[in-house]
């Protein structure tokens, strides 16, 4: 396996700390400098390693959360869990990882929603959903590969919006919302499986019935 470059190693080391310092300094160079001082990294090297633009800093942070998540969910931790439990656990653990930077995450969502940053936001959202499905053991390569990631992006994104404003103890509001969203997804997946199981389904016959309903 190829070793990451020295600058990438520095970037990976700094990324989570940059997010935590962005709570006070925003997604600015000051957050990078503070993170470097906190971790004893040369500030000049830190500035070279971390992207200069806000969207780049945020994307670096999100990537580090993905890596942290992957390191946490070992095969032993996933063993015996149903797919529903895996997905819920993955989303909840992401929130726990990001908790020290929650206010910075709130700002990050606004920054990524800007027109010039939408490509970065969409790319990072897809990468996150793909990471979570891979950790959960998904190996699909057909159309399901894409629908699963799109669905999970929606569940995670909407949960994130609830979480950044949740002041309830233990994030109870977020927890209840996440459970409802996952239940919706499970019902949708069940419907898809039933629909695909209709081997003799005819689109022509179906459309004909819509036009000429049986009496």
Image (cartoon, rainbow, N blue to C red):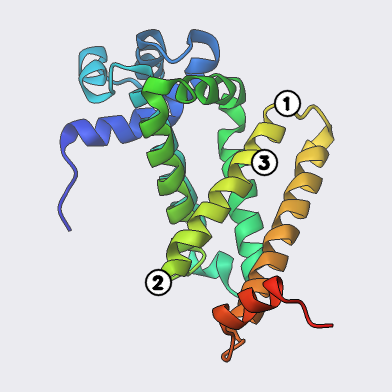
Tell me the element at label 3: helix
Q: Tag on residue 200?
A: none
Q: Nearer the viewer, residue 192 or 50?
A: 192
Q: Is residue 138 left or right of residue 205?
A: left
Mark 2 / mark 3, whichever is N-terminal: 2
Label pair 3/1, CB-CB below 8 angstroms: no
Q: Position of residue 190 (x, y in %)?
A: 68, 74
Query: Is residue 82 visible from the viewing direction of this image?
Result: no
Q: Quadrant of residue 123?
A: top left
Q: Quadrant of residue 156?
A: top right
Q: Quadrant of residue 45?
A: top left
Q: Position of residue 46 (x, y in %)?
A: 26, 20
Name the residue tied to disc 3: 159
Q: Quadrant of the N terminus?
A: bottom left
Q: Nearer the viewer, residue 80 or 58?
A: 58
- For the point 41% across and 18% down, the residue is 38
Q: Position of residue 180 (x, y in %)?
A: 78, 53
Tell me the element at label 1: loop
Q: Position of residue 85 (x, y in %)?
A: 67, 64
Tell me the element at label 2: loop
Mark 3 / mark 1, whichever is N-terminal: 3
Q: Tag on residue 142?
A: 2
- For the point 73% across and 26% down, the residue is 165
Q: Nearer the viewer, residue 178 or 35?
A: 178
**Mark 1 or mark 2, which is nearer to you?**
2
Above or below, 62 against 27 in this view is below
Above or below, 58 against 44 in this view is below
Name the residue tied to disc 1: 165
The crowding category of the residue bearing disc 1, from other C-alpha atoms within 10 Å (few below 14, some 14 to 19, many at least 20), is some
Query: Is residue 6 visible from the viewing direction of this image?
Result: yes
């Amino acid at each position: 396996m190829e070793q990451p470059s020295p600058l990438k190693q520095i970037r990976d080391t700094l990324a989570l700390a940059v997010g935590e310092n962005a709570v006070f300094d925003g997604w600015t160079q000051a957050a990078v400098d503070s993170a470097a001082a906190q971790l004893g990294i040369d500030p000049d090297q830190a500035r070279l390693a971390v992207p200069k633009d806000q969207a780049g800093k945020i994307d670096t942070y999100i990537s580090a959360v993905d890596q942290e998540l992957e390191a946490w969910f070992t095969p032993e931790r996933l063993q015996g869990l149903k797919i529903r439990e895996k997905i819920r656990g993955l989303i909840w653990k992401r929130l726990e990882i990001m908790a020290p930077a929650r206010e910075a995450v709130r700002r990050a969502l606004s920054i990524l929603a800007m027109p010039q940053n939408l490509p970065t936001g969409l790319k990072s959202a897809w990468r996150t959903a793909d990471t979570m499905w891979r950790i959960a053991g998904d190996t699909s390569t057909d159309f399901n590969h894409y629908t699963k990631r799109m669905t999970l992006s929606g569940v995670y994104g909407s949960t994130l919006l609830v979480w950044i404003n949740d002041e309830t103890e233990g994030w109870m509001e977020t927890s209840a919302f996440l459970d409802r969203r996952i239940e919706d997804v499970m019902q949708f997946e069940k419907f898809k499986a039933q629909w695909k199981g209709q081997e003799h389904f005819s689109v022509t016959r179906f459309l004909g019935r819509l036009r000429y309903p049986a009496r």
